[in-house]
Structure formats: C-alpha cells, structure tokens
C-alpha cells in the first residue's frame, strides 16, 4: 500500500471528521457561554420541563437493547412538575410489542449537559448550542438544534459562506415595508435569511446535479408568486381598518375579518421553545383550533426570526391531507400567533413510546403518509428538516398531520443551517456541506427504524456522540427485523446523498416503488383510504386527554417588545 493512499483514504477521513466535531464543539461551547450569560429560568413562559410517564416502555426498550446502547438511550430520569402526567393509554393501539398502559417518569427534555440541567431546570443549560430547542424531546439527548452564532437577531443560521460575506442589511426593516404583501415577505427573506441558499460549488456538486437529473435553472422558485396566489392572503388594501391583531382573510365561505378576540383559549396542550400551543374555540365558527403563541422577545433572543417567518410563509402556501393547516396568523406587541386545526389524537411519539415499537404494517402506514407529504413539499421546493415522531400528530380519524414547520425552508438549491434534531440529522448537515431535500429522506430512514425498533439508529447521551455515530454510518440491526423494511432503511440511510433513495433522478418515485410499499395504491394513500392502525381514544373534537397537562398558572404574560424590535415582524 503506498503512502499517499494511506494518507488519502485512511488518515484524511479521520482527520476531517475530527475537525468537524471539534468545530461543532467550539460552536456548542460558544453558544452555551452566550446562553449562560443571558438567561435564567425556563423560557419566557416560565414553564417547567415537560415529563411523561413511560418507564415501562423504557424498561422494555432497555431489555431489547444491548446493554451499552441501553445505557446511552435511557438517560438519567428526573421527576416532572406536579400535574404534568401523560394520560395516554396504549389500549387502542395496534402495535408490535405494545402492552397496555405504562407509567413511570421519563425525562422529556434531555439537555446537552443532562445532569446539570436536570438539577437546575435552567434554560441556560437546556438551550445550549445552536439554540437547542428542548421543549419537545423526550428520550432524545436534546431536541431540535438550529445554529445561532452571531449577535444579530436576524441571523439565525450558520454558514461558512456568510462569514466571508460583507454584512448584509441587518437593521430592522423600516415602516416603508408593507406588513402583509407577499413580495415584501419574500424580499425580506432574501435580505435577511442567513439560512443561505447558494449555487452548489463543492466537489460533489456535479455528481449531485447529475444524480438528481436537474439543472440549475430548474430549481429557481419564486415564493412570492405562490404566496400572493394563496387564498389566505391578507387583504390590507380592501380593509384599511385592520389592526395588527385583526385582518380580513378570504375563506371558502367569503371574506372573514379575523380578530384575536374571536378565539377563546381553553387549555395549554403543548410547549415549545418560544411559547406554547393552546386548544381554543373559534367563537364564530365554533370550531376547535390550536393557537401557537410565540413570545417575540424569545424569538429575537434566540435569533429565530427568519425561521418563524419561514414557518408562517410556508404554511400559508401549502395544503395537503397530512400536513397541518394554518388558518390565520397575527401578532400583538408581545406575541406572534398562528391558528391551526386542532389535532386531538396527540403525538405519534407518545403512541410509539407506549407501544415500545410498531409492527411493520403500522410503520408502513405512517411511513406512506409521510412519503406522500414529503413528495408534495419537495415539489414546492420546501425542505421540512424536522421529521421525528414528536412532530407527527394523529388526527381523530387516525391519519397523520405533520406539524412544526419551524425549520422548513424554501430552497433554491442548498442551505447551510445546522438544524434538526440530533438523532435525525443527516451527515451532510453535520459536515456543513450544504444540504437539500435529501435530508428529509435520511430522516425518513431514521423514523422508519425508530418505529420498527423502538429507538433511533444513532444514539448517544451527547449530541457529539450521536454525530460521530451518524458519520460512521454503522447501524445495529435487530435480528428479526422485516428484511424488506431493512432494505428500504439501508437505502435511505446512505451517507452519500447522491445515492440516497428519494434524492436521485426519479425523486420520491424511487421510494414509492420500493418493495416495502409494493402493496399500496398511492392515490388511496393520499385520499386517506387506508385503514389507520391506531384510532385515538377521544370523545369529542376538543378532547385534550391525549395531551399532557400543563399548570396554566405558570404562564406569565410575555414582555412587549419595543417599536424597533417590532419592526422585525412587520411582514408577519
Ligand atoms: N395543531 C395542533 N393540534 C394539537 N396539538 C398541537 C398542534 N400543534 C402543536 N401541538 C402540540 O404542541 C406541541 C408544540 O408544538 P410545535 O412543535 O409546533 O411548537 P414549537 O414551539 O415549534 O416546538 P419546538 O420548540 O419543540 O419546535 C406539539 O408537539 C403538539 O404536542
């Protein structure tokens, strides 16, 4: 073996990966340090971390896992806030090894420094890094991550290219920007969104173009056009009286003038990084809905302005049976508000943890609905970037609704943000190579594995351990795993994204034609004709029994932001 071969093929890859991990460590350290300086207490709302009662599932998973893996997956437990208990039972679940009701404490938010954070409940530890979004994770070593390096509140993302670029327009937008036109929204995103899309420029670009069977011209997409076309567009010209908390929206039944007062808040059903999600009742239509309330001070502090705007803009544009529907959005001087359909069945995550794992049939059903949604999103050049069981809600009819578009982004080509949930992050995101829709197909592979096995394929207590495992590409397989499902997972969890199923020239069709989905008629999938394996136990549309209880008295009103900061959200 010649010397240059050893350097190129053995030493270089190790050194490269070590450098990447070192870089991530430095960013983590930097961000921890920044967060520690600036925060005490847990988020603007003051809500304690959420816990659940799922020890039996944990014990079962522990039994089924090798001791070493188990020690990593079953991280230290903490007791939760009084009253924060899961009411969910597994009685109605058709699953693999599911076995009824389970109780025990299960740490919902596992910070990067789990012991310290568990002891203090302090967001300065739980929000370490690239803005760790720890509100939603249960058995994860941490939840979502999104990089936030700069002190510019508009700069939510990290990219090497950015650092070399001259400072972009970083002042808050002026009043001359119309608050609701799509063009403004779009130009704002272009001007401030540091989740940079760039033409491909590194070595594998050409390969990738070839593999995708597309050329650069094909990928251009003018988001402003589609947003303007959207029936939900607020019509300021027709209604000059519209205040920020109210607006007229064209609905199927004609123009409706929405007001925040139209919604009666009933109960908190979920918490997130910047606020909470409440069940509410629309006094006009008498429909139940979910109101996501985001404290602007937190959005600014965590440099997530563009991500939040992306979320709203993308959601306004899309409509699909397996994607949450945004009905209206608005703001006041303290909060941003998004009104969604209320999905009363709760999170797929809870059903999965209660069951331990799903059968191949059950997993296949959910995977098919996700494939249908991903195909649709990608056709609009939207990359979702946060696929995981916590973000999949089960509707009363048993079908899925994908929620939380906080990391979704309309792509021209590639983007560089380090974001996602560690266990679900694709290797190219860790390596800061620039990523595209291929990351969603990777995440689908992780999700199918987690549904079938009960835990994700790459796990460690620390995000860096997870990243190391992802980059190593080694996966432990269960002996009795469905071999056809295993084949699909292998084809999705391919480190080289140009060879990853879903990202090649036939796109989603390659996934849809895989043998694991052979029996499916994809029109039936889209039209919800398949029989759902789980029917949630709910008594009426506003039932909250499938969600945890949150002590309502813990919510403190978010602080009003000053006029200058308010302008960041002019186009929200
Ligand atoms: N439309 C809905 N119907 C019912 N529950 C919902 C709905 N939307 C969100 N939830 C609940 O609220 C939780 C938090 O919502 P979401 O993930 O959108 O908030 P987030 O602030 O973006 O959270 P994170 O910071 O974890 O990303 C969800 O996991 C879910 O349990």
Image: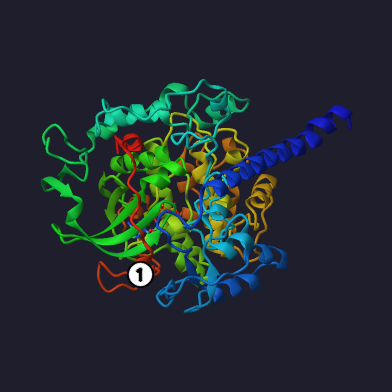
Q: Classify the position of the N terminus by image quarter.
A: top right
Q: Residues within 10 Å of mark 1 (few under 14, many from 20)?
A: some
Q: Up-down: is 535 above or below 293?
A: below
Q: Residue at x 53, y 21 (%)?
A: 165
Residue 458 lies left or right of residue 437; in this view the side is right
Colouring mode (rainbow / by chain / secondary structure / one colour): rainbow
- Residue 217 location, quadrant: top left
- Residue 61 location, quadrant: bottom right
Q: Nearer the viewer, residue 188 or 82?
A: 82
Residue 157 lies left or right of residue 528; in this view the side is right
Query: x and y percent of residue 108 in the render?
Result: 51, 64
Q: Residue at x 68, y 42 (%)?
A: 21
Report helix, strand or loop for mark 1.
loop
| Observer able to see residue 488 | no
Q: In the image, is the residue at mark 1 within 8 Å of ligand 1 by its beta carbon? A: no
Query: x and y percent of residue 515 in the render?
Result: 51, 52
Residue 417 lies left or right of residue 264; in this view the side is right
Query: Mark 1 sits on what residue?
Result: 535
Q: Residue at x 49, y 23 (%)?
A: 167
Residue 75 lies left or right of residue 338; in this view the side is right
User: Which image quadrant shows ligand 1?
Assistant: bottom left
| Observer able to see residue 144 | yes
Q: Nearer the viewer, residue 61 or 192?
A: 192
> How many labels sit on residues?
1
Q: Residue at x 57, y 46 (%)?
A: 129
Q: Up-down: is 444 above or below 52?
A: above
Q: Nearer the viewer, residue 23 or 518?
A: 23
Q: Nearer the viewer, residue 223 or 42?
A: 42
Q: Classify the position of the C terminus by image quarter.
A: top left
Q: Up-down: is 487 above or below 220?
A: below
């Amino acid at each position: 073996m010649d010397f240059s071969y050893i350097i190129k093929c053995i030493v270089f890859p190790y050194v490269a990966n070590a450098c990447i991990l070192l870089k991530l460590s430095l960013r983590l350290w930097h961000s921890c340090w920044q967060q520690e300086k600036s925060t005490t207490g847990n988020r603007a709302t003051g809500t304690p971390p959420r816990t659940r009662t799922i020890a039996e599932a944990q014990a079962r998973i522990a039994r089924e896992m090798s001791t070493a893996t188990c020690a990593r997956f079953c991280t230290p437990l903490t007791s939760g806030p009084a009253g924060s208990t899961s009411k969910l039972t597994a009685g109605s679940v058709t699953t693999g090894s599911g076995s009824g009701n389970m109780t025990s404490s299960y740490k919902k938010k596992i910070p990067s420094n789990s012991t310290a954070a568990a002891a203090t409940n302090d967001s300065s530890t739980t929000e370490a890094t690239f803005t760790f979004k720890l509100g939603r994770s249960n058995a994860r070593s941490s939840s979502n991550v999104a990089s936030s390096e700069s002190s510019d509140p508009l700069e939510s993302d990290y990219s090497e290219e950015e650092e070399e670029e001259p400072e972009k327009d970083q002042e808050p937008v002026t009043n001359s920007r119309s608050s609701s036109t799509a063009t403004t929204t779009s130009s704002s995103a272009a001007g401030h969104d540091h989740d940079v899309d760039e033409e491909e420029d590194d070595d594998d670009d050409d390969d990738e173009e070839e593999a995708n069977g597309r050329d650069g011209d094909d990928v251009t997409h003018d988001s402003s056009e589609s947003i303007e076309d959207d029936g939900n567009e607020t019509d300021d010209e027709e209604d000059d009286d519209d205040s920020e908390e109210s607006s007229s929206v064209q609905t199927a039944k004609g123009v409706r003038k929405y007001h925040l007062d139209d919604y009666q808040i009933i109960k908190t059903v979920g918490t997130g990084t910047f606020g909470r999600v409440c069940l509410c009742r629309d006094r006009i239509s008498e429909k139940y809905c979910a109101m996501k309330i985001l404290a602007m001070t937190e959005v600014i502090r965590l440099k997530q302005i563009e991500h939040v705007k992306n979320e709203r803009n993308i959601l306004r544009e899309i409509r699909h049976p397996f994607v949450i529907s945004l009905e209206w959005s608005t703001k006041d001087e303290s909060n941003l508000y998004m009104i969604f359909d209320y999905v009363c069945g709760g999170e797929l995550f809870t059903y999965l943890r209660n069951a331990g794992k799903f059968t191949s049939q059950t997993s296949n059903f959910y995977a098919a609905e996700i494939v249908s949604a991903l195909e649709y999103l990608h056709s609009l050049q939207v990359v979702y970037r946060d696929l995981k069981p916590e973000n999949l809600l089960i509707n009363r009819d048993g079908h899925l609704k994908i929620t939380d578009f906080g990391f979704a982004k309309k792509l021209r080509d590639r983007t560089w943000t380090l974001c996602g949930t560690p266990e679900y992050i694709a290797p190219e995101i860790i390596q800061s190579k620039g990523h595209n829709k291929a990351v969603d197909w990777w995440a689908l592979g992780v999700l199918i594995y987690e549904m079938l096995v009960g835990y994700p394929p790459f796990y460690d207590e620390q995000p860096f351990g997870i990243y190391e495992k992802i980059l190593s590409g080694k996966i432990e397989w269960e002996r009795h795993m469905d071999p056809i499902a295993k084949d699909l997972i292998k084809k999705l969890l391919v480190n080289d994204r140009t060879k990853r199923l879903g990202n090649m020239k036939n796109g989603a069709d390659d996934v849809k034609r895989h043998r694991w989905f052979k029996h499916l008629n994809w029109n039936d999938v889209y039209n919800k004709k398949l029989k759902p394996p789980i029917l949630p136990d709910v008594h009426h549309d506003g039932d909250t029994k499938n969600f945890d209880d949150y002590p309502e008295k813990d919510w403190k009103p978010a602080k009003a932001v000053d006029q200058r900061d308010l302008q960041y959200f002019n186009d929200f």
